[in-house]
Image (cartoon, helix red, strand yellow):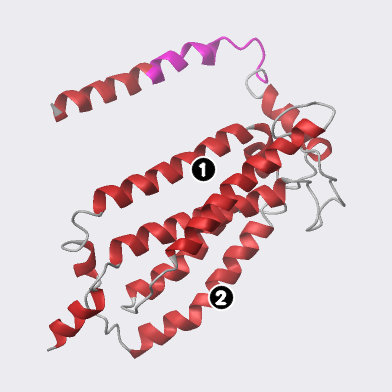
Amino acid sequence: MRKLTGLLLMGGFVLYLVSLVPGLFNATTPTALDSVGAAIIEDSRTTSGSANVVTAIVVQYRGLDTLGEVTVLFVSALGVAILASGFRDDVFRSMFADDDGGFILQYGGRLLMPFIVLVGVYIVAHGHLSPGGGFPGGVLIATAVFILILTGQSARMPHRLLSILEGAAGLGFIGLGALGFLGSELSFLTNTLPKGEYLTLLSAGFIPFIYAMVGIKVASELTTVVSVLTEAPGHESGKEEGRS
């Protein structure tokens, strides 16, 4: 059954690639294929106010797709937590059973944690000015927690707070997109906020705020997944029994 499923998936992927081939030879001019991209690049500064065109595309031109990606991440994190909850005590917790990561690793992790979080926040806040944004910045913020766990330190997360942050970030994304209905275009995810001064931190309208919501959501979801896999009731008592 697994082989059949794999063959069907591979066959579907090959069929998808084959279907793209005719379109590559139907362009009447050499620039016909990149005309949409050229128009976006030319219009990006006026429409979005973002110096990073990639950010403008991700958040504004294909904002619905980005909202879908955030939803997929949430469903994936939920699925991992549910599937792993039945065997995490035997598999995942055993990987982190040794709480003595050594003086250098433990204190080095504590020393690096605030700097990693700071860099992650910087990447999120400057996503409309330079490469970065909510997804890589959120992952980097969550990495600070991973380091604490990997060095064998106890890092019990406030799951209730993480759940609140995750839900609030998702609602914030949708709320910022709904502001588009207040503008003249009456369209979801229309950038109706003031664009500000170009190439400054407070520019690009709602794009920095949406990236902030994405960063919070990604960081909270990934942190929740790792903490769920590595901590469980009786974790500390199990360690004490191992020492004795």
Q: Nearer the viewer, residue 142 or 129?
A: 142
Q: Are marks 2 and 1 in contact (CB under 8 Å)?
A: no
- Above or below for 100 versus 189: below
Q: Quadrant of residue 106?
A: bottom left
Question: Is 172 displayed left or right of 95 in the figure?
Answer: right
Range of the magenta residues? 16-31
Q: Nearer the viewer, residue 160 or 61?
A: 160
Q: Quadrant of residue 231?
A: bottom left
> What number is the disc on residue 70?
1
Please indicate, yes or no, whether residue 122 appears anywhere in the rendered image: yes
Q: Amino acid at mark 2?
A: Phe
- Above or below for 98 versus 79: below
Furthest residue in direction right, as rendered: 197
From the top left corner, tell me how far across and down residue 60 is, in percent: 69, 36
At horizontal 64% and vertical 50% (from top left) the residue drawn is 211
Q: Count of labels shown?
A: 2
Look at mark 2 in the image and give the residue it sits on.
Answer: 115
From the top left corner, tell me how far across and down residue 164 is, in percent: 53, 57
Secondary structure of the residue carrying tag 1 is helix
Is 150 covered by the magenta stretch? no
Is 23 covered by the magenta stretch? yes
Rate crowding at label 2 as few (under 14), some (14 to 19) or many (20 or more) other CA atoms within 10 Å.
Answer: few
| Between marks 2 and 1 in the image, the one whose residue lies nearer the viewer | 1
At horizontal 43% and vertical 63% (from top left) the residue drawn is 159
At horizontal 46% and vertical 17% (from top left) the residue drawn is 20
Rate crowding at label 1 as few (under 14), some (14 to 19) or many (20 or more) other CA atoms within 10 Å.
Answer: some
> What number is the disc on residue 143?
none
From the top left corner, tell me how far across and down residue 83 is, in percent: 25, 48
- Distance between the alpha carbons at the discs numbered 2 and 1: 26 Å
At horizontal 25% and vertical 54% (from top left) the residue drawn is 85
Q: Earlier in the sequence, mark 2 or mark 1?
A: 1
